[in-house]
Amino acid sequence: MKRALVIAAALIATVFLPLLVLLLNSGSPATWPALWLAPQALNALSGTLLSSFGASLVALVFGLPFAWLVTRSDVAGARGLKTLVTLPSAIPPYLWTMGWIALANPRSGWLTLVIGQNRLDVYGLGGIAFVLGTSALPLVVLATSAAFERIDSSLEEAARLSGASALRTFTTITLPLITPAALSGAALVFVFASASFGVPYLLGVSANPPTPTLTTRIYGEVLMGEAGLSRAAVLSVELLVVAVGVLLLNGWLAKAGRVRLPRGKGLGQKVLSLGRLRGLVSTAAWATAITIIVLPLGAIFLTGLQPTWGQWGSLTFKHWGVVMQARTLQAIGVSLALALVAALLVGSIGLMIAMTKRRWLETLADAPSAIPGTVLALALLVTFSRDVRFVAVERVAFVLALGNTFWLLLLSYVVKHLALGVRSSSDALSQADPTLGEAARLSGAGRFRAFVDGIFPQLRGALSAAVLLTFLTCVSELTMSVLLIPTGSDVLGTLLFELQSYADPGSAAVIASALLLVVLAALLVESAMVRRAEAR
Protein backbone atom coordinates (compact mmCIF):
# COMPACT_ATOMS: atom_id res chain seq x y z
CA MET A 1 0.00 0.00 0.00
CA LYS A 2 2.88 2.36 0.81
CA ARG A 3 4.38 1.89 -2.65
CA ALA A 4 1.01 2.60 -4.26
CA LEU A 5 0.64 5.83 -2.30
CA VAL A 6 4.14 6.98 -3.30
CA ILE A 7 3.41 6.35 -7.00
CA ALA A 8 0.03 8.07 -6.69
CA ALA A 9 1.65 11.12 -5.08
CA ALA A 10 4.20 11.29 -7.90
CA LEU A 11 1.44 11.12 -10.54
CA ILE A 12 -0.55 13.83 -8.80
CA ALA A 13 2.52 16.07 -8.58
CA THR A 14 3.51 15.62 -12.22
CA VAL A 15 0.10 15.51 -13.94
CA PHE A 16 -2.84 16.75 -11.92
CA LEU A 17 -1.08 19.50 -10.00
CA PRO A 18 0.26 21.02 -13.26
CA LEU A 19 -3.27 20.89 -14.70
CA LEU A 20 -4.50 22.78 -11.64
CA VAL A 21 -1.72 25.35 -12.07
CA LEU A 22 -2.71 25.70 -15.73
CA LEU A 23 -6.30 26.41 -14.70
CA LEU A 24 -5.15 28.98 -12.16
CA ASN A 25 -3.07 30.71 -14.84
CA SER A 26 -6.02 30.91 -17.20
CA GLY A 27 -7.67 33.64 -15.16
CA SER A 28 -11.23 33.74 -13.90
CA PRO A 29 -13.62 31.24 -15.52
CA ALA A 30 -15.96 34.15 -16.07
CA THR A 31 -13.56 35.49 -18.70
CA TRP A 32 -13.28 32.21 -20.63
CA PRO A 33 -16.46 32.56 -22.77
CA ALA A 34 -15.30 35.92 -24.12
CA LEU A 35 -12.07 34.37 -25.44
CA TRP A 36 -13.79 31.17 -26.64
CA LEU A 37 -16.35 33.22 -28.59
CA ALA A 38 -13.76 35.50 -30.20
CA PRO A 39 -13.71 35.05 -34.01
CA GLN A 40 -10.18 33.59 -34.10
CA ALA A 41 -10.96 31.11 -31.31
CA LEU A 42 -14.22 30.07 -32.97
CA ASN A 43 -12.39 29.47 -36.24
CA ALA A 44 -9.82 27.33 -34.39
CA LEU A 45 -12.56 25.34 -32.64
CA SER A 46 -14.42 24.88 -35.92
CA GLY A 47 -11.24 23.70 -37.64
CA THR A 48 -10.57 21.22 -34.84
CA LEU A 49 -14.09 19.77 -34.79
CA LEU A 50 -14.46 19.53 -38.57
CA SER A 51 -11.01 18.04 -39.19
CA SER A 52 -11.42 15.56 -36.33
CA PHE A 53 -14.86 14.48 -37.50
CA GLY A 54 -13.55 14.16 -41.04
CA ALA A 55 -10.60 12.07 -39.83
CA SER A 56 -12.99 9.75 -37.96
CA LEU A 57 -15.11 9.38 -41.09
CA VAL A 58 -12.07 8.63 -43.26
CA ALA A 59 -10.83 6.02 -40.77
CA LEU A 60 -14.27 4.36 -40.72
CA VAL A 61 -14.66 4.37 -44.51
CA PHE A 62 -11.30 2.63 -44.99
CA GLY A 63 -11.11 0.75 -41.68
CA LEU A 64 -14.40 -1.18 -41.72
CA PRO A 65 -13.82 -2.88 -45.11
CA PHE A 66 -10.21 -3.67 -44.26
CA ALA A 67 -11.20 -5.15 -40.89
CA TRP A 68 -13.83 -7.37 -42.51
CA LEU A 69 -11.53 -8.47 -45.31
CA VAL A 70 -8.62 -9.51 -43.07
CA THR A 71 -10.79 -11.34 -40.50
CA ARG A 72 -13.86 -12.76 -42.26
CA SER A 73 -12.90 -13.26 -45.92
CA ASP A 74 -10.38 -15.26 -47.95
CA VAL A 75 -8.78 -12.15 -49.43
CA ALA A 76 -5.33 -12.88 -50.83
CA GLY A 77 -2.51 -12.19 -48.37
CA ALA A 78 -4.81 -11.35 -45.44
CA ARG A 79 -2.00 -11.44 -42.87
CA GLY A 80 0.25 -9.15 -44.90
CA LEU A 81 -2.66 -6.80 -45.63
CA LYS A 82 -3.46 -6.48 -41.93
CA THR A 83 0.20 -5.76 -41.16
CA LEU A 84 0.25 -3.09 -43.85
CA VAL A 85 -2.93 -1.27 -42.75
CA THR A 86 -1.77 -1.23 -39.11
CA LEU A 87 1.69 0.13 -40.01
CA PRO A 88 0.66 3.80 -39.47
CA SER A 89 0.52 3.20 -35.71
CA ALA A 90 4.33 3.11 -35.63
CA ILE A 91 4.95 6.19 -37.80
CA PRO A 92 4.43 9.81 -36.69
CA PRO A 93 1.50 11.54 -38.43
CA TYR A 94 3.61 14.45 -39.65
CA LEU A 95 5.75 12.04 -41.69
CA TRP A 96 2.63 11.00 -43.59
CA THR A 97 1.99 14.72 -44.09
CA MET A 98 5.43 15.15 -45.65
CA GLY A 99 4.69 12.27 -48.02
CA TRP A 100 1.33 13.67 -49.10
CA ILE A 101 2.81 17.14 -49.59
CA ALA A 102 5.30 15.56 -52.00
CA LEU A 103 2.43 13.76 -53.76
CA ALA A 104 -0.40 16.32 -53.80
CA ASN A 105 1.27 19.71 -53.61
CA PRO A 106 -0.93 21.75 -56.02
CA ARG A 107 2.11 23.02 -57.97
CA SER A 108 4.88 20.42 -57.90
CA GLY A 109 3.53 17.18 -56.40
CA TRP A 110 4.01 13.89 -58.17
CA LEU A 111 0.31 13.35 -58.69
CA THR A 112 -0.03 16.98 -59.74
CA LEU A 113 2.50 16.42 -62.53
CA VAL A 114 0.41 13.49 -63.76
CA ILE A 115 -3.10 14.94 -63.66
CA GLY A 116 -2.33 18.66 -63.96
CA GLN A 117 -1.76 21.60 -61.64
CA ASN A 118 -4.36 22.80 -59.16
CA ARG A 119 -6.49 19.64 -59.50
CA LEU A 120 -5.20 18.19 -56.25
CA ASP A 121 -4.50 20.19 -53.11
CA VAL A 122 -3.56 18.45 -49.89
CA TYR A 123 -3.58 21.74 -48.00
CA GLY A 124 -6.66 22.81 -46.06
CA LEU A 125 -9.40 21.12 -44.10
CA GLY A 126 -9.91 18.17 -46.45
CA GLY A 127 -6.20 17.34 -46.55
CA ILE A 128 -5.89 17.54 -42.76
CA ALA A 129 -8.85 15.19 -42.29
CA PHE A 130 -7.56 12.71 -44.89
CA VAL A 131 -4.01 12.55 -43.56
CA LEU A 132 -5.11 12.27 -39.92
CA GLY A 133 -7.73 9.67 -40.81
CA THR A 134 -5.32 7.43 -42.71
CA SER A 135 -2.57 7.81 -40.08
CA ALA A 136 -5.08 6.78 -37.38
CA LEU A 137 -6.49 3.92 -39.46
CA PRO A 138 -5.18 1.18 -37.08
CA LEU A 139 -7.43 2.47 -34.27
CA VAL A 140 -10.50 1.46 -36.26
CA VAL A 141 -9.02 -1.62 -37.95
CA LEU A 142 -7.78 -3.24 -34.73
CA ALA A 143 -10.91 -2.49 -32.70
CA THR A 144 -13.28 -3.70 -35.42
CA SER A 145 -11.15 -6.76 -36.26
CA ALA A 146 -11.31 -7.83 -32.62
CA ALA A 147 -15.10 -7.51 -32.71
CA PHE A 148 -15.33 -9.54 -35.93
CA GLU A 149 -13.17 -12.28 -34.40
CA ARG A 150 -15.46 -12.54 -31.37
CA ILE A 151 -18.65 -13.04 -33.41
CA ASP A 152 -19.79 -16.65 -33.61
CA SER A 153 -20.39 -17.44 -37.28
CA SER A 154 -23.33 -19.66 -36.34
CA LEU A 155 -25.37 -16.50 -35.73
CA GLU A 156 -24.87 -15.42 -39.32
CA GLU A 157 -25.41 -18.95 -40.63
CA ALA A 158 -28.74 -19.14 -38.78
CA ALA A 159 -29.88 -15.94 -40.49
CA ARG A 160 -28.84 -17.27 -43.92
CA LEU A 161 -30.65 -20.57 -43.30
CA SER A 162 -33.76 -18.57 -42.43
CA GLY A 163 -33.71 -17.05 -45.90
CA ALA A 164 -31.88 -13.77 -45.29
CA SER A 165 -29.56 -12.55 -48.03
CA ALA A 166 -25.87 -11.91 -47.37
CA LEU A 167 -26.51 -8.14 -47.28
CA ARG A 168 -29.46 -8.46 -44.91
CA THR A 169 -27.47 -10.80 -42.66
CA PHE A 170 -24.65 -8.29 -42.48
CA THR A 171 -26.91 -5.30 -41.76
CA THR A 172 -29.14 -7.04 -39.20
CA ILE A 173 -26.69 -9.42 -37.46
CA THR A 174 -23.06 -8.53 -38.07
CA LEU A 175 -23.21 -4.73 -38.21
CA PRO A 176 -25.03 -4.25 -34.85
CA LEU A 177 -22.47 -6.53 -33.19
CA ILE A 178 -19.42 -4.64 -34.45
CA THR A 179 -20.87 -1.12 -34.31
CA PRO A 180 -19.85 -0.38 -30.68
CA ALA A 181 -16.25 -1.36 -31.43
CA ALA A 182 -16.19 0.64 -34.65
CA LEU A 183 -17.63 3.73 -32.94
CA SER A 184 -15.12 3.34 -30.12
CA GLY A 185 -12.29 3.28 -32.64
CA ALA A 186 -13.74 6.31 -34.43
CA ALA A 187 -13.98 8.20 -31.13
CA LEU A 188 -10.31 7.49 -30.45
CA VAL A 189 -9.50 8.78 -33.93
CA PHE A 190 -11.43 11.97 -33.12
CA VAL A 191 -9.46 12.49 -29.90
CA PHE A 192 -6.20 11.67 -31.69
CA ALA A 193 -6.98 14.16 -34.47
CA SER A 194 -8.12 16.94 -32.13
CA ALA A 195 -4.85 16.66 -30.19
CA SER A 196 -2.63 16.58 -33.29
CA PHE A 197 -0.32 19.51 -33.95
CA GLY A 198 2.10 18.67 -36.76
CA VAL A 199 -0.48 17.76 -39.42
CA PRO A 200 -2.75 20.82 -38.89
CA TYR A 201 0.27 23.11 -38.80
CA LEU A 202 1.92 21.80 -41.97
CA LEU A 203 -1.34 21.57 -43.94
CA GLY A 204 -3.42 24.30 -42.31
CA VAL A 205 -1.15 27.30 -41.81
CA SER A 206 -0.02 27.27 -45.45
CA ALA A 207 -3.54 26.73 -46.83
CA ASN A 208 -5.39 29.45 -48.72
CA PRO A 209 -7.29 30.50 -46.70
CA PRO A 210 -5.51 29.14 -43.58
CA THR A 211 -7.21 26.42 -41.57
CA PRO A 212 -6.54 27.05 -37.86
CA THR A 213 -7.07 24.49 -35.10
CA LEU A 214 -6.89 24.75 -31.34
CA THR A 215 -3.43 23.17 -31.16
CA THR A 216 -1.92 25.51 -33.74
CA ARG A 217 -3.63 28.46 -32.09
CA ILE A 218 -2.22 27.48 -28.68
CA TYR A 219 1.25 27.18 -30.20
CA GLY A 220 0.92 30.64 -31.70
CA GLU A 221 -0.09 32.12 -28.35
CA VAL A 222 2.85 30.46 -26.56
CA LEU A 223 5.26 31.99 -29.07
CA MET A 224 4.06 35.41 -27.93
CA GLY A 225 5.62 34.82 -24.50
CA GLU A 226 4.09 35.77 -21.16
CA ALA A 227 1.40 37.85 -22.87
CA GLY A 228 -0.01 34.84 -24.67
CA LEU A 229 0.32 32.19 -21.95
CA SER A 230 -2.98 33.02 -20.25
CA ARG A 231 -4.85 32.90 -23.57
CA ALA A 232 -3.10 29.63 -24.43
CA ALA A 233 -4.20 28.24 -21.06
CA VAL A 234 -7.84 29.14 -21.74
CA LEU A 235 -7.70 27.52 -25.18
CA SER A 236 -6.09 24.46 -23.58
CA VAL A 237 -9.05 24.15 -21.24
CA GLU A 238 -11.33 24.20 -24.29
CA LEU A 239 -9.27 21.51 -26.02
CA LEU A 240 -9.31 19.38 -22.87
CA VAL A 241 -13.09 19.74 -22.61
CA VAL A 242 -13.46 18.59 -26.23
CA ALA A 243 -11.26 15.51 -25.71
CA VAL A 244 -12.82 14.46 -22.40
CA GLY A 245 -16.33 15.14 -23.73
CA VAL A 246 -15.79 12.86 -26.73
CA LEU A 247 -14.36 10.09 -24.55
CA LEU A 248 -17.32 10.32 -22.13
CA LEU A 249 -19.78 10.30 -25.03
CA ASN A 250 -18.02 7.29 -26.50
CA GLY A 251 -18.27 5.47 -23.18
CA TRP A 252 -21.97 6.22 -22.93
CA LEU A 253 -22.67 5.12 -26.51
CA ALA A 254 -20.64 1.94 -26.07
CA LYS A 255 -22.50 1.10 -22.88
CA ALA A 256 -25.93 1.88 -24.35
CA GLY A 257 -25.31 -0.08 -27.53
CA ARG A 258 -23.16 -2.85 -26.13
CA VAL A 259 -23.94 -6.30 -27.46
CA ARG A 260 -22.57 -9.22 -25.48
CA LEU A 261 -20.33 -11.33 -27.66
CA PRO A 262 -19.42 -14.89 -26.74
CA ARG A 263 -15.91 -15.50 -25.49
CA GLY A 264 -13.55 -18.38 -24.99
CA LYS A 265 -12.87 -21.55 -26.90
CA GLY A 266 -15.35 -23.15 -29.23
CA LEU A 267 -16.35 -20.08 -31.23
CA GLY A 268 -17.27 -20.92 -34.78
CA GLN A 269 -15.24 -18.76 -37.14
CA LYS A 270 -16.17 -19.24 -40.78
CA VAL A 271 -14.27 -17.44 -43.49
CA LEU A 272 -16.49 -16.19 -46.30
CA SER A 273 -15.32 -17.21 -49.74
CA LEU A 274 -15.22 -14.32 -52.20
CA GLY A 275 -15.57 -16.78 -55.08
CA ARG A 276 -15.04 -15.37 -58.53
CA LEU A 277 -14.65 -11.89 -57.05
CA ARG A 278 -11.62 -12.89 -54.96
CA GLY A 279 -9.08 -11.67 -57.50
CA LEU A 280 -10.85 -8.37 -58.11
CA VAL A 281 -11.49 -7.67 -54.42
CA SER A 282 -7.95 -8.65 -53.42
CA THR A 283 -6.46 -6.42 -56.11
CA ALA A 284 -8.66 -3.49 -55.05
CA ALA A 285 -7.83 -3.96 -51.36
CA TRP A 286 -4.09 -4.17 -51.92
CA ALA A 287 -4.14 -1.26 -54.39
CA THR A 288 -5.99 0.90 -51.87
CA ALA A 289 -3.62 -0.01 -49.04
CA ILE A 290 -0.56 0.65 -51.20
CA THR A 291 -1.98 4.01 -52.33
CA ILE A 292 -2.73 5.38 -48.87
CA ILE A 293 0.22 3.83 -47.01
CA VAL A 294 3.11 2.81 -49.26
CA LEU A 295 2.83 5.64 -51.78
CA PRO A 296 3.37 8.55 -49.31
CA LEU A 297 6.27 6.72 -47.65
CA GLY A 298 7.85 6.09 -51.03
CA ALA A 299 7.36 9.76 -51.87
CA ILE A 300 9.42 10.74 -48.83
CA PHE A 301 12.32 8.54 -49.93
CA LEU A 302 12.27 9.81 -53.51
CA THR A 303 11.94 13.43 -52.39
CA GLY A 304 15.21 13.02 -50.52
CA LEU A 305 16.81 11.96 -53.81
CA GLN A 306 15.66 15.00 -55.78
CA PRO A 307 18.47 17.35 -56.93
CA THR A 308 16.32 20.31 -55.85
CA TRP A 309 13.12 20.04 -53.88
CA GLY A 310 10.10 20.26 -56.17
CA GLN A 311 12.17 19.82 -59.34
CA TRP A 312 12.72 16.50 -61.04
CA GLY A 313 15.87 15.36 -62.75
CA SER A 314 18.49 12.67 -62.18
CA LEU A 315 18.19 11.31 -58.66
CA THR A 316 21.12 11.81 -56.30
CA PHE A 317 22.26 10.78 -52.83
CA LYS A 318 24.21 13.99 -52.26
CA HIS A 319 21.62 15.38 -49.85
CA TRP A 320 22.07 12.39 -47.53
CA GLY A 321 25.13 14.13 -46.18
CA VAL A 322 22.73 16.19 -44.03
CA VAL A 323 22.33 13.13 -41.80
CA MET A 324 25.98 13.39 -40.83
CA GLN A 325 25.87 17.09 -39.99
CA ALA A 326 26.59 17.99 -36.36
CA ARG A 327 23.13 19.41 -35.69
CA THR A 328 21.38 16.36 -37.10
CA LEU A 329 23.60 13.89 -35.25
CA GLN A 330 23.05 15.76 -32.01
CA ALA A 331 19.28 15.74 -32.50
CA ILE A 332 19.37 12.02 -33.31
CA GLY A 333 21.49 11.25 -30.24
CA VAL A 334 19.26 13.26 -27.91
CA SER A 335 16.09 11.71 -29.36
CA LEU A 336 17.41 8.18 -29.07
CA ALA A 337 18.56 8.74 -25.49
CA LEU A 338 15.30 10.37 -24.37
CA ALA A 339 13.17 7.74 -26.12
CA LEU A 340 15.19 4.84 -24.67
CA VAL A 341 15.08 6.17 -21.09
CA ALA A 342 11.38 7.02 -21.41
CA ALA A 343 10.58 3.56 -22.78
CA LEU A 344 12.46 1.80 -19.98
CA LEU A 345 10.77 3.98 -17.35
CA VAL A 346 7.33 3.36 -18.86
CA GLY A 347 7.94 -0.38 -18.79
CA SER A 348 9.37 -0.54 -15.26
CA ILE A 349 6.96 1.93 -13.62
CA GLY A 350 4.04 0.35 -15.47
CA LEU A 351 5.05 -3.04 -14.10
CA MET A 352 5.35 -1.65 -10.57
CA ILE A 353 1.84 -0.15 -10.81
CA ALA A 354 0.36 -3.37 -12.20
CA MET A 355 1.98 -5.42 -9.42
CA THR A 356 0.24 -3.32 -6.76
CA LYS A 357 -3.06 -4.69 -8.14
CA ARG A 358 -4.75 -1.44 -7.18
CA ARG A 359 -7.42 -0.65 -9.74
CA TRP A 360 -7.65 2.98 -8.67
CA LEU A 361 -3.91 3.43 -9.22
CA GLU A 362 -4.11 1.96 -12.71
CA THR A 363 -6.94 4.36 -13.50
CA LEU A 364 -4.85 7.25 -12.19
CA ALA A 365 -1.90 6.23 -14.37
CA ASP A 366 -4.19 5.81 -17.38
CA ALA A 367 -5.62 9.34 -17.13
CA PRO A 368 -2.69 11.23 -18.79
CA SER A 369 -3.16 9.24 -22.01
CA ALA A 370 -6.54 10.96 -22.46
CA ILE A 371 -5.04 14.44 -22.04
CA PRO A 372 -4.06 16.09 -25.35
CA GLY A 373 -0.29 16.37 -25.60
CA THR A 374 -0.48 20.13 -26.15
CA VAL A 375 -2.45 20.58 -22.91
CA LEU A 376 -0.12 18.35 -20.89
CA ALA A 377 3.00 20.07 -22.26
CA LEU A 378 1.61 23.53 -21.58
CA ALA A 379 0.64 22.52 -18.03
CA LEU A 380 4.17 21.27 -17.36
CA LEU A 381 5.65 24.37 -18.99
CA VAL A 382 3.61 26.75 -16.83
CA THR A 383 4.21 24.77 -13.64
CA PHE A 384 7.95 24.17 -13.95
CA SER A 385 9.01 27.26 -15.87
CA ARG A 386 10.37 28.54 -12.54
CA ASP A 387 12.47 26.65 -10.01
CA VAL A 388 10.54 24.83 -7.30
CA ARG A 389 12.17 25.13 -3.86
CA PHE A 390 11.67 22.89 -0.83
CA VAL A 391 13.07 23.78 2.58
CA ALA A 392 13.53 21.04 5.18
CA VAL A 393 14.19 21.69 8.87
CA GLU A 394 14.77 25.34 8.02
CA ARG A 395 18.34 24.54 6.97
CA VAL A 396 18.33 22.22 3.98
CA ALA A 397 16.93 23.54 0.69
CA PHE A 398 16.10 21.43 -2.34
CA VAL A 399 15.75 23.12 -5.72
CA LEU A 400 13.83 21.40 -8.53
CA ALA A 401 14.89 23.12 -11.76
CA LEU A 402 13.13 21.42 -14.66
CA GLY A 403 12.29 24.46 -16.77
CA ASN A 404 14.09 24.71 -20.12
CA THR A 405 15.74 21.30 -19.63
CA PHE A 406 15.45 17.90 -21.26
CA TRP A 407 14.27 16.51 -17.91
CA LEU A 408 10.91 18.21 -18.41
CA LEU A 409 10.62 16.75 -21.90
CA LEU A 410 11.47 13.29 -20.54
CA LEU A 411 8.84 13.70 -17.82
CA SER A 412 6.20 14.53 -20.42
CA TYR A 413 7.10 11.42 -22.46
CA VAL A 414 6.85 9.14 -19.44
CA VAL A 415 3.55 10.36 -17.98
CA LYS A 416 1.89 10.59 -21.41
CA HIS A 417 2.71 6.99 -22.34
CA LEU A 418 2.66 5.39 -18.90
CA ALA A 419 -0.74 3.82 -19.61
CA LEU A 420 0.87 1.62 -22.26
CA GLY A 421 3.24 0.05 -19.74
CA VAL A 422 0.46 -0.35 -17.15
CA ARG A 423 -1.99 -2.01 -19.54
CA SER A 424 0.60 -4.36 -21.01
CA SER A 425 1.89 -5.38 -17.57
CA SER A 426 -1.60 -5.78 -16.11
CA ASP A 427 -2.77 -7.98 -19.00
CA ALA A 428 0.39 -10.08 -18.85
CA LEU A 429 0.16 -10.53 -15.08
CA SER A 430 -3.47 -11.65 -15.34
CA GLN A 431 -2.39 -14.43 -17.73
CA ALA A 432 0.81 -15.43 -15.93
CA ASP A 433 0.98 -18.74 -14.06
CA PRO A 434 1.64 -17.91 -10.37
CA THR A 435 2.62 -21.48 -9.54
CA LEU A 436 6.05 -20.95 -11.12
CA GLY A 437 6.83 -18.20 -8.65
CA GLU A 438 5.43 -20.26 -5.80
CA ALA A 439 7.60 -23.23 -6.80
CA ALA A 440 10.66 -20.98 -6.73
CA ARG A 441 9.76 -19.77 -3.23
CA LEU A 442 9.34 -23.35 -2.03
CA SER A 443 12.78 -24.12 -3.46
CA GLY A 444 14.28 -21.46 -1.19
CA ALA A 445 14.39 -18.47 -3.51
CA GLY A 446 13.63 -15.04 -2.11
CA ARG A 447 10.66 -12.99 -3.24
CA PHE A 448 12.69 -10.99 -5.77
CA ARG A 449 14.51 -14.05 -7.17
CA ALA A 450 11.22 -15.95 -7.42
CA PHE A 451 9.70 -13.11 -9.41
CA VAL A 452 12.72 -12.82 -11.73
CA ASP A 453 12.93 -16.57 -12.40
CA GLY A 454 9.28 -17.56 -12.26
CA ILE A 455 7.05 -14.64 -13.24
CA PHE A 456 9.12 -12.15 -15.23
CA PRO A 457 9.88 -14.53 -18.15
CA GLN A 458 6.12 -14.77 -18.69
CA LEU A 459 5.85 -10.98 -18.88
CA ARG A 460 8.87 -10.38 -21.10
CA GLY A 461 6.98 -10.45 -24.40
CA ALA A 462 4.29 -7.96 -23.39
CA LEU A 463 6.79 -5.64 -21.71
CA SER A 464 9.14 -5.75 -24.70
CA ALA A 465 6.29 -4.76 -27.01
CA ALA A 466 5.28 -1.87 -24.71
CA VAL A 467 8.87 -0.65 -24.43
CA LEU A 468 9.43 -0.84 -28.20
CA LEU A 469 6.18 0.97 -29.02
CA THR A 470 6.96 3.69 -26.48
CA PHE A 471 10.45 4.07 -27.92
CA LEU A 472 9.15 4.41 -31.49
CA THR A 473 6.54 6.94 -30.39
CA CYS A 474 8.94 9.09 -28.37
CA VAL A 475 11.91 9.06 -30.75
CA SER A 476 10.07 11.30 -33.20
CA GLU A 477 7.49 12.97 -30.92
CA LEU A 478 6.53 16.51 -31.95
CA THR A 479 3.37 17.77 -30.20
CA MET A 480 4.90 18.04 -26.72
CA SER A 481 8.48 18.50 -27.88
CA VAL A 482 7.75 21.69 -29.79
CA LEU A 483 6.61 23.38 -26.56
CA LEU A 484 9.11 21.85 -24.11
CA ILE A 485 12.35 21.66 -26.10
CA PRO A 486 15.12 23.64 -24.35
CA THR A 487 16.15 26.84 -26.09
CA GLY A 488 18.78 26.26 -28.77
CA SER A 489 18.35 22.48 -28.74
CA ASP A 490 16.73 19.98 -31.10
CA VAL A 491 15.16 16.57 -31.10
CA LEU A 492 14.26 14.73 -34.29
CA GLY A 493 10.65 15.87 -34.24
CA THR A 494 11.41 19.57 -33.85
CA LEU A 495 14.28 19.44 -36.35
CA LEU A 496 12.08 17.83 -38.99
CA PHE A 497 9.31 20.30 -38.22
CA GLU A 498 11.62 23.27 -38.66
CA LEU A 499 13.21 21.99 -41.88
CA GLN A 500 9.88 21.06 -43.46
CA SER A 501 8.11 24.28 -42.42
CA TYR A 502 10.74 26.96 -42.85
CA ALA A 503 14.17 25.92 -44.05
CA ASP A 504 14.85 22.92 -46.27
CA PRO A 505 12.09 20.37 -47.13
CA GLY A 506 14.60 18.30 -49.12
CA SER A 507 16.84 17.81 -46.09
CA ALA A 508 13.75 17.08 -44.01
CA ALA A 509 12.84 14.30 -46.44
CA VAL A 510 16.32 12.79 -46.11
CA ILE A 511 16.20 12.77 -42.30
CA ALA A 512 12.63 11.45 -42.40
CA SER A 513 13.78 8.64 -44.70
CA ALA A 514 16.51 7.68 -42.24
CA LEU A 515 13.95 7.73 -39.42
CA LEU A 516 11.59 5.50 -41.42
CA LEU A 517 14.40 3.00 -42.01
CA VAL A 518 15.01 2.86 -38.24
CA VAL A 519 11.29 2.36 -37.56
CA LEU A 520 10.95 -0.38 -40.17
CA ALA A 521 14.06 -2.13 -38.84
CA ALA A 522 12.65 -2.03 -35.29
CA LEU A 523 9.35 -3.49 -36.51
CA LEU A 524 11.19 -6.31 -38.27
CA VAL A 525 13.11 -7.07 -35.07
CA GLU A 526 9.87 -7.12 -33.09
CA SER A 527 8.25 -9.43 -35.64
CA ALA A 528 11.21 -11.80 -35.43
CA MET A 529 10.99 -11.79 -31.63
CA VAL A 530 7.27 -12.61 -31.77
CA ARG A 531 7.81 -15.48 -34.20
CA ARG A 532 10.62 -16.83 -32.04
CA ALA A 533 8.43 -16.68 -28.95
CA GLU A 534 5.58 -18.44 -30.77
CA ALA A 535 7.96 -21.15 -31.96
CA ARG A 536 8.85 -21.93 -28.36
Image: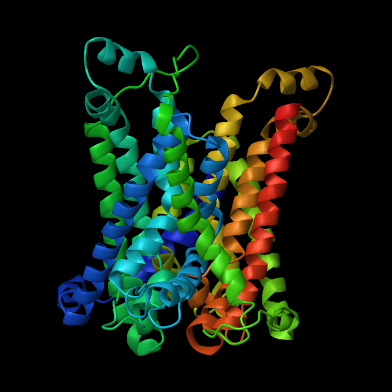
Q: Position of residue 415 (x, y in %)?
A: 52, 57
> How far across and how far down the image is residue 114, in percent?
43, 73
Residue 439's quadrant in the figure? top right
Residue that extends furthest to the right in the rendered view of this protein: 444
Q: In screen coordinates, is 280 left or right of 415?
A: left
The image shows residue 1, relative to residue 536, as above or below, that is below
User: Residue lying farthest front?
Assistant: 276
Count of numbered circles on the image: 0
Indicate left or right for 147 with 499 as reference: left
- Expressed as whole percent of the image width and height from the top left, the position of residue 394 reads 59, 73
What colour scheme governs how the chains and residues are painted in the rendered image of this protein? rainbow
Residue visible at 72% across and 72% down in the picture: 333
159 or 200: nearer the viewer: 159
Q: Residue at x 51, y 70 (%)?
A: 478
Residue 382, position in %: x, y? 43, 76
Q: Nearer the viewer, residue 172 or 475?
A: 172
Classify 409 as above or below 241. below
**Which quarter of the image is occupied by the C terminus?**
top right
For residue 126, above or below residue 425: below
Residue located at (48% from left, 76% from top): 483
On the question of residue 375 being in view, the answer is yes
Classify residue 232 by image quadrant. bottom left
Quarter of the N terminus within the rendering: top right
167 or 89: nearer the viewer: 167
Q: Nearer the viewer, residue 505 or 439?
A: 505
- Residue 491 visible in the picture: no
